[in-house]
Image: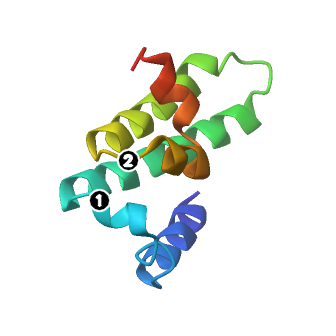
Amino acid sequence: MNATVGHARLAAVGGRLASESWYSRFDESAKNRMRELGTDLVQALVAFLADTDGVWTDAITRIGRQYAELARSAGLSVGTLDRIGVRSQVHNRRI
């Protein structure tokens, strides 16, 4: 799990994420929260893989909604939300 999170951080530090125009809309606090959510997502994936009979919908939905709330707070456009994969959560407005 730590290796997966580490690879994601390397991608961010390596400039791939920083070069995305939408990413600059987030302040440092939001970026830190996105990192925390990334760790939560990897932990949920590991838990799912350890127990594929478990019910993981609520945990994954919660993480997705938190990502969507960060995106909405940053004022990202619907087109950008589509591109980064969080639009459906924002439009549900159950964040």
- Mark 2 residue element: loop
Q: Which residue is mark 2?
A: 76
Residue, far right: 53
Q: Position of residue 15 (x, y in %)?
A: 45, 83
Q: In the rendered structure, are the residues bearing label 2 and label 1 in contact, judged by CB atoms less than 8 Å apart?
A: yes
Q: Quadrant of residue 50?
A: top right
Q: Is residue 70 above or below residue 57?
A: below
**Numbered label attached to residue 63:** none
Q: Is residue 35 above or below residue 90?
A: below
The crowding category of the residue bearing disc 2, from other C-alpha atoms within 10 Å (few below 14, some 14 to 19, many at least 20), is: some
Q: Which residue is drawn at the image coordinates 46% and 71% (left, top)?
A: 20
Query: In front: 16, or 62?
Result: 16
Query: In front: 37, or 18?
Result: 18
**Numbered label attached to residue 25:** 1
Asked whether residue 69 is in view, the answer is yes
Q: Is residue 27 above or below residue 40?
A: below
Q: Which residue is drawn at the image coordinates 51% and 70% (left, top)?
A: 6
The kind of residue tagged 1 is Arg
Query: In front: 16, or 44?
Result: 16
Quadrant of the frame with the N terminus: bottom right
